[in-house]
Amino acid sequence: MPVSAPSGPRSRATRALALASVLLLTAACSSPSGAPPGSDPTAALPLPGPEDGADAPDGDDRGAPGDGGGNGGPVGDGPLGDRVVVIDPGHNGGNADAPDEINAMVPAGPNEKACDTVGTETASGYAEHEFNWELSVLVKERLEADGATVVLTREDDGGVGPCINERAEIGNEEGADAAVSLHADGGPESGRGFHVIMPGEVEGFTDDITEPSRLLGEDIHRAYLEGSDVPTADYLADDGLDVRTDLGGLNMSDVPKVFLETGNMRNPEDAALMEDPAWREQAADAIARGLAFYLMRG
């Protein structure tokens, strides 16, 4: 079941929100929300960080908790105080020992797919499931420090699953404003970089989330490219943005959701970064910044 992690230092999260606010102020001089790709829609004035102690803008109910079911951290103590985010750390540490369970077929949209997979690892044996968990907790800490309710789809890195449809359902049940599934790719050793996967339109499934998911994906893509020191993938996708209709975690979602493949674990340069705890902090800053920008759109 979903679980919370302790909040991290406010200073780091405040820097992320401050940078997101700068981006938001820049966007205020450009096109309105719903504009085509390549333009930065505006949403609201930049919000103060939690250390400022300032009130929310007049008429804004940011101090009210979100509909997060009580599984997130403290809310109402920052600019994201009425926002609910679900973070899905891909895979799980017990999957390899439960082949029958993770190979079982589950709903994935119009078709069925396996419940889950094991994931990849670096050449030195650093497992993707462990990386995804550690990075997700760091992102969660940053968002919670700015008041958001944040729910993880798994409670630790030693369990099995949950299945892809169950991961999506957690976001649906929480009424999340945004959901992101964090992964690392297992591409060719010669290929480097990150990419964001957004849902394509699947009639009866993703019709109502494709546009907000595109905006979410572009915001995370922009922040991650600027802050992670990882280039966009040179072996797939288009400038680090991909649209897919075959992923159950996207097809079964009723809330805006994307996958972030943070880099290629089979590539030595990307792997060296992922294995570095300091870089994981840096990457978490960038991801939290992208999410904050999206969450402050409206």
Image (spheres, rainbow, N blue to C red):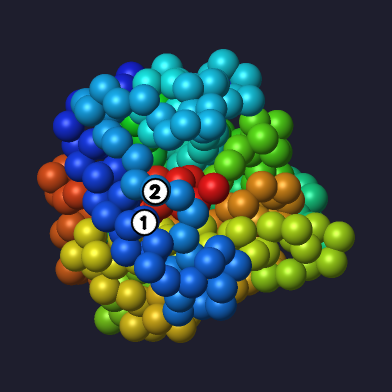
* Whole-percent x, y for residue 143 in the image: 37, 35
Specify few, some or many for label 2: CA neighbours under 10 Å numbering under 14, 14-19, or 20 or more.
Answer: some
Cα–Cα span, label 2 and label 1: 7 Å
Q: How many marks?
A: 2
Quadrant position of the N terminus in the picture: top right
Regarding mark 2 in the picture, which secondary structure is present there?
A: loop
Residue under label 2, please give it: 45
Q: Are marks 2 and 1 in contact (CB under 8 Å)?
A: yes
What residue do we see at 49% from left, 54% from top? Answer: 43
Res 298 visible = yes
Res 123 visible = no
Amino acid carrying mark 2 in the image? Leu
Specify few, some or many for label 1: CA neighbours under 10 Å numbering under 14, 14-19, or 20 or more.
Answer: many
In depth, the one of 18 and 203 nearer the eye is 18
Tell me if residue 103 comes above or below residue 37 in the rendering. above
Regarding mark 1 in the picture, which secondary structure is present there?
A: helix
From the viewer's perspective, tell me whether residue 79 is left or right of residue 225: right
Which quadrant would residue 131 be assigned to in this image?
Answer: top left
* Whole-percent x, y for residue 290 in the image: 38, 53
From the viewer's perspective, tell me whether residue 66 is left or right of residue 133: right
What residue do we see at 26% from left, 22% from top? Answer: 53
The mark that comes first in sequence, 2 or 1, is 1
What residue do we see at 19% from left, 65% from top? Answer: 229
From the viewer's perspective, tell me whether residue 218 is left or right of residue 282: right
* Whole-percent x, y for residue 264 in the image: 33, 66
Q: Nearer the viewer, mark 2 or mark 1?
A: 2
Question: Which label belongs to residue 118?
Answer: none
* Residue furthest out toward the front: 58
Residue under label 1, please give it: 24
* Whole-percent x, y for residue 259 in the image: 51, 57
